[in-house]
Image (cartoon, rainbow, N blue to C red):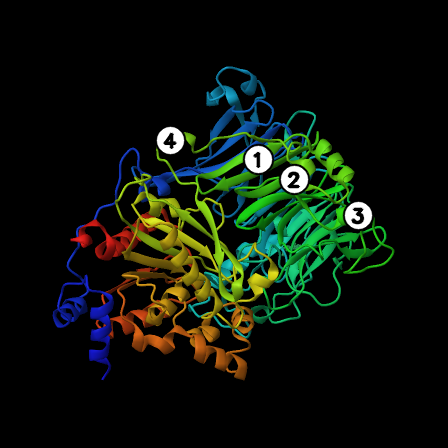
């Protein structure tokens, strides 16, 4: 009989629980448990969960064509009026610190129409409505740029697009081409969407019917519609009025191509030159759910001829196709393996004049995630993760070889990008006229701010002069200026921790990295002991990076009085491809040697951690790890409580039920019924080790999580309950793999901190 065994385990591992088991299982069967009084630590000097949810959220800065102003999308939620207010800040790249704040009552996407005109798109009843306003340059010279009425003039509605889903706008001032995406039916026609939507809604039943995958993806059941690209002319007349006609071009019409690629694709899935669009789309000849292969196509903006493929041969996913400034080359980020989303991305350049493609970062063991050509097309700038930071890199563009090759022979200076930044997490890289580079950076201590490098000419010269021997030259050449301080006032006095890096030996004697954040109130030399939490990241091909997060923000845990330990174990990105690849078919293996070694290292390095008051929490793969630790008491972590958010419980069933089947097939060694994955599943599915479970556990799941469906947490909850282990299930019916709603986010934090506080909080010491 399993019951007494579990009882035993329960007593040895969770001595703090005071209710007798029988009584406890009775009260637990009634849904309402005894409420445990719990309140967050809050106050003017504390960065509490409520402060995280209410802190303004700046997006990445986007500059105008002249490169003198940039707009930053901004949103700020308030619990007082329960509203998420959208706005944009317009900042000057030349007079630092000056900003105009423009409220956007109805939210929506913004983009530049000219040096001083910003368009802003609002979803109307049946259409997307584009409004414009002019920003006054004088506002940046005057004394009071924050006076909104002085700073901009609304110009009203300038055009509508007959689709509510118009998005991802790119406007070319010179040619007047406005390119955007919208969801259309297979006829690829913007003007028939409303009618076909109506037919569908009035079909007389609610069934969804599928003959192929994806039947659902991320958080959405598939419909017949897909995202395609459109263009229309929009020009400013002599009279200053914006003019447009209804001659929408549909350059992807007649293809099955969908771009941006859902669910996360955006403007970085296509680029626009004066004459053409280059875009990436999934290979439509392959089943979507178990292939990742994407191809790159080029098509005239005016749809005068059909798309032509630039890619060839075998490869995997492709991201970020970009034109060079002259429109004569395209570069993109290409993964080699079809069926693996975390393969190393390599930069491929396609020379449109010579019809030659070549790979330039074949020998660089880092994976870029965005790129842009310099204005003179001699350099590429890119962002890439490097040892848990996301840095900006520069790389000279090599001469085009005589024929296409994935292994060209180039001088060292052409093959190894050079880091221009060394901390934080960069995004939104944009090359500007006048040798400037604009980007945004966040960190553990700050959400996005805009940064600029103004001397890329000198940097490029220094890199070329160094001829591949770079590091020594650059330190004093690169000058990064911070343009904004969006959160400065709100975070003042909160003393957020920058995080301390530590390294230790993990599995196979490899060097493994982690972060430690000391709890709020920690003082050197004091005897006080603190509870600690091990945070486990998802992916598993991801990393705890020096980056701001509105979910799993480590400083929120530190501010509630927890010593925070985060480890980047085997499988983590930014430490080289071998380290990332090494988790495949070994989910319950090397990562846990790493985490245990890292955890012991942290306990030893920080004797102020109370080893009797520790917990662990994780989401997604991190949730797998929680369920795995639960079933492996022999590791001896000694956690008093566990928190699993959207985690894997029965890996075998998940291999069938998840949306992206390629992920399971890659990670477990085949489809769920194949011999290799059967073997791996037997070894590493958490559901096989439930008989050893004994630690109190909180489970949280979003019902719209189609990556790891909610039955993963429900199954684990049923196991915990039948074993009489203190447990709670929190379900968010409207959330996907992430908790995004502001109220839900606060509730999430409340449940997490309430649960762990029960077992390791200050009161539990007595
Ligand atoms: C789109 O549909 C409309 C209405 O049926 C039709 O008049 C028009 O020719 C179609 N356009 C294209 C590009 O197929």
Observer able to see residue 513? yes
Q: Which residue appears at 67% of the width and 41% of the height?
A: 471
Q: Which mark is residue 492?
A: 4
Q: Is residue 172 rendered to the left or right of residue 43?
A: right
| Gap in angstroms between the C-alphas marked 2 and 1 | 10 Å
Q: Nearer the viewer, residue 51 or 129?
A: 51
- Are dots 2 and 4 in contact, CB under 8 Å? no
First along the sequence among labels 2 and 4:
2
Q: Is residue 714 rendered to the left or right of residue 213?
A: left
Mark 2 nearby-residue class (10 Å; few <14, some 14–19, many ≥20): many
Which residue in the protein does label 1 denote?
Answer: 119
Q: Nearer the viewer, residue 147 or 21?
A: 21
Q: Residue furthest top?
A: 143
| Gap in angstroms between the C-alphas marked 2 and 4 | 39 Å
Give the quarter of the image for residue 727: bottom left
Q: Decide: is 137 above or below 735.
A: above
Q: Secondary structure at mark 3?
A: loop
Q: Decide: is 111 above or below 357.
A: above
| Quadrant of the image containing the N terminus | bottom left
Q: Is residue 766 rendered to the left or right of residue 715?
A: left
Q: Which percent across, then down, holds residue 15? A: 19, 64
| Gap in angstroms between the C-alphas marked 1 and 4 | 34 Å
Q: Which residue appears at 54% of the width and 61% of the height?
A: 510
């Amino acid at each position: 009989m399993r019951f007494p065994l579990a009882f035993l385990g329960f007593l040895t591992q969770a001595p703090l629980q005071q209710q007798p088991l029988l009584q406890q299982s009775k009260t637990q069967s009634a849904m309402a448990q005894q409420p445990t009084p719990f309140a967050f630590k809050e106050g003017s000097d504390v960065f509490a969960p409520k402060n995280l949810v209410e802190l303004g959220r700046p997006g990445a800065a986007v500059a105008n064509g002249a490169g003198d102003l940039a707009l930053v999308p901004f949103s700020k939620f308030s619990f007082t009026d329960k509203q998420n207010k959208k706005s944009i800040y317009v900042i000057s790249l030349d007079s630092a610190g000056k900003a105009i704040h423009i409220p956007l009552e109805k939210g929506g996407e913004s983009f530049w129409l000219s040096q001083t005109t910003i368009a802003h798109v609002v979803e109307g009843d049946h259409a997307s409505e584009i409004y414009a306003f002019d920003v006054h340059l004088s506002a940046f010279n005057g004394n009071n740029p924050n006076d909104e009425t002085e700073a901009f003039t609304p110009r009203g509605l300038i055009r509508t697009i007959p689709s509510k889903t118009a998005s991802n706008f790119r406007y070319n001032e010179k040619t007047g081409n406005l390119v955007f995406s919208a969801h259309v039916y297979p006829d690829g026609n913007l003007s028939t969407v409303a009618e076909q939507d109506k037919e569908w809604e009035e079909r007389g039943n609610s069934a969804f019917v599928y003959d192929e995958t994806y039947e659902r993806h991320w958080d959405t059941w598939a419909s017949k519609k897909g995202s395609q690209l459109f263009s229309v002319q929009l020009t400013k007349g002599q009279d200053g009025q914006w003019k447009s006609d209804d001659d929408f071009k549909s350059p992807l019409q007649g293809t099955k191509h969908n771009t941006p690629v859902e669910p996360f694709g955006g403007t970085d899935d296509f680029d626009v030159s004066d004459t053409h669009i280059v875009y990436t789309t999934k290979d439509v000849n392959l089943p979507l759910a178990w292939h990742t292969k994407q191809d790159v196509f080029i098509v005239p903006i005016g749809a005068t001829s059909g798309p032509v493929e630039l890619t060839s041969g075998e490869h995997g996913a492709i991201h970020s196709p970009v034109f060079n400034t002259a429109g004569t080359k395209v570069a993109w980020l290409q993964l080699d393996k079809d069926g693996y989303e975390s393969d190393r991305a390599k930069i491929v350049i396609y020379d449109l004049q010579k019809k030659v493609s070549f790979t330039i970062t074949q020998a660089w063991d880092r994976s870029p995630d965005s790129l842009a050509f310099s204005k003179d097309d001699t350099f590429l700038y890119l962002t890439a993760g490097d040892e848990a930071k996301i840095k900006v890199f520069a790389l000279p563009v090599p001469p085009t070889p005589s024929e296409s090759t994935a292994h060209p022979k180039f001088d060292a200076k052409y093959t190894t990008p050079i880091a221009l930044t060394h901390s934080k997490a960069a995004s939104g890289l944009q090359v500007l006229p006048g040798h400037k580079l604009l980007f945004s950076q966040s960190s553990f201590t700050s959400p996005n701010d805009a940064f600029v490098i103004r001397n890329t000419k000198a940097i490029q010269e220094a890199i070329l002069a160094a001829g591949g021997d770079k590091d020594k030259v650059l330190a004093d050449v690169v000058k990064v200026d911070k343009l904004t301080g969006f959160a400065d006032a709100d975070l003042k006095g909160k003393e957020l921790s920058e995080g301390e890096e530590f390294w230790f030996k993990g599995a196979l004697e490899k060097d493994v990295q982690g972060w430690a954040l000391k709890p709020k109130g920690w003082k050197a030399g004091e005897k006080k002991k603190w509870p600690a939490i091990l945070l486990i990241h998802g992916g598993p091909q991801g990393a705890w990076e020096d980056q701001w997060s509105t979910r799993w923000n480590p400083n929120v845990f530190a501010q509630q009085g927890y010593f925070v330990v985060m480890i980047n174990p085997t499988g983590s990105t930014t430490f080289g491809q071998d380290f990332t690849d090494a988790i495949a078919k070994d989910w319950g293996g090397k990562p846990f040697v790493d985490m245990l070694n890292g955890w012991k290292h942290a306990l030893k390095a920080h004797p102020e951690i109370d080893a009797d008051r520790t917990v662990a929490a994780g989401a997604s793969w991190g949730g797998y790890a929680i369920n795995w630790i639960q079933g492996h008491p022999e590791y001896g972590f000694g956690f008093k409580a566990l928190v699993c958010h959207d985690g894997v419980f029965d890996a075998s069933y998940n291999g069938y039920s998840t949306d992206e089947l390629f992920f399971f097939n890659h990670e477990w060694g085949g489809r769920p019924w194949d011999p290799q994955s059967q073997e791996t599943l037997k070894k590493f599915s958490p559901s096989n080790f439930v008989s050893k479970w004994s630690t109190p556990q909180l489970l949280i799941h979003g019902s719209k999580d189609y990556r790891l469906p909610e039955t993963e947490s429900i199954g684990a909850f049923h196991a915990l309950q039948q074993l009489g282990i203190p447990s709670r299930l929190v379900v968010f019916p409207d959330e996907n793999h992430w908790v995004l709603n502001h109220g839900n986010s606060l509730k999430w934090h409340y449940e997490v901190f309430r649960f762990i506080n029960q077992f390791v909080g200050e009161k539990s010491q007595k």
